[in-house]
Image (cartoon, rainbow, N blue to C red):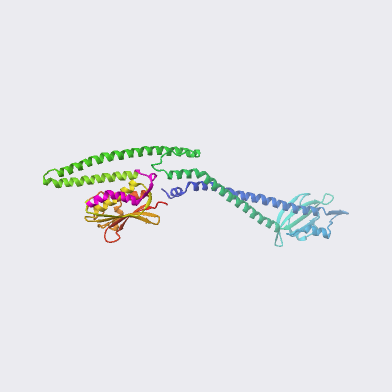
Amino acid sequence: MTASQLRRATYSLKQRLLIWLMLPVLVAVPVAGLVLYQVMHDTAISWLDQALGDTALAVASLLRERDGQVFVDVSGPTDRALRFDRTDRIYYLVLDPAGNVLHGDQQLARIQLPKRKPNEWIFTVAALNGETLRAAALGATCGNGRVCQILVAETLNKRDALQQQLVLVVGLIIGGMAVLLAAAGWWATYRGLRPLARLSAELEQRDLARLEPLQANVPGELRPLIAAFNRLFERLRRASSAQQDFLANAAHQLRTPLTSLRTEIDLALLEPHDPQVEPLLKRLQRSVDRSARLATQMLSIARAEAETSGGEQPLDLRDIAAQVAEDWVPRALESGVDLGFELESAPVLGQGFLLRELLENLLHNSVNYAGENASITVSTGCAGDWAWLEVVDNGPGIPPEERERALRRFERGNEMKVTGSGLGLAIALDIAQRHHGRLELLDAVTGPGLRVRLSVPKRPA
């Protein structure tokens, strides 16, 4: 997989939808902002130019003709009214048809503009005495078909302030629009993916005990997926049923002949026989015992994998240990093992069969590997949010560097002198993990030996 494919694979469906929703927003919002700013700016400038043009028209209305001479009838108050502005400085100039100054600010004559025809306008930006001005030029009729030139100019203070305000307003509008669109996109994505999240939560809770069809109350796009899952559940139901049938048949087919063979060997040992044959019969007896134990462990693995969390019941590890004690105390006495119990309440949620199988395997390992005259103690109790069960023996133990390997299937310690299948601890680990717990191989508290500790979440009160 290439780096680009790996990056694409890491994006969730929600992230991809948001990216594709936000890409048009990132393009459209700035464009819309520029268009909005340009429209508002051009409209505002047009209004200001119109106000400047109105001043030019007001000056043109003051043109008079007397005895063939053109003059501007401007009094002091009128001049002040024409120049009044709270923000900018206003300049104006009137030229006669010959281009001579009739009235106004003579420095405006340095702005070279072509002569206008009657009622012809020109708006431009000009520089004068280090200032930038907005100028409006008008051709006005001033008697006998002659045309006078009127020029009105103002500084750009209010235009610059207006431009800053437009940038601020448009920025706020576009920014708010972008935030709203992003929020709407996120909300639409969240709402649109909620059925998928509910489906995921429902699938997370499914196990072999819950394989009923999923409900089809979902959007149409998810119905093919629901149908595919339901077909998968149907196949799993058939496979689980076939597995259970296999377990029942295998238990009968394996245990019956092995039990019969063990019985025949026991009878052969009881009957008069050649002493030279007895070692052979003893070896056969041990082989049959190992085979029976291996078959039982293999079936336990299969059943542990078939069992699911749907069958969890309120249990107490103390009761589990007490039940196992009924079977193991006589066997321990026969093997010359000192088996003791220190039991306190340890409530959990679990499956009794699997927990009993776990303890059976731990005890079998201890009896088998601790040696003759061994001492084994089974303890239960609680520590914080965890309930625990321990099996401690005073045997040779397992070196720390080999403990991880000893938990694997068909693996045994290098120093083990007793034959075995290497499945007991692996089965115990599988059962511990199925109960959301952990299995630890530790040193005995005092002296040599092995301490196997099962920790399972404590059952809520």
Residue 423 shows up from this direction: no
Q: Main secondary structure of the magenta part?
A: helix
Residue 69 versus residue 72: which sits nearer the camera? 72
Q: Is residue 116 above or below residue 268?
A: below
Q: Residue at x 27, y 44 (%)?
A: 296
Q: Position of residue 359 (x, y in %)?
A: 30, 50
Magenta highlight on residue 329: yes
Q: Which residues are magenta?
A: 306-333
> On the picture, is 240 further left or further right than 14?
left
**Residue at horizontal 23 percent and vertical 45 percent from the top:** 291
Q: Is residue 266 left or right of residue 302?
A: left
Q: From the viewer's perspective, is 148 left or right of 459?
A: right
Percent of width and height locating residue 432 = 35, 50
Foreground pick, 312 / 76: 312
The answer, for residue 281, to whether it is visible in the render is yes
- Residue 77 inside the magenta-drawn segment: no
The image shows residue 295 at horizontal and vertical percentages of 26, 44
The one nearer the camera, 279 or 377, is: 377
Residue furthest toward the bottom?
129
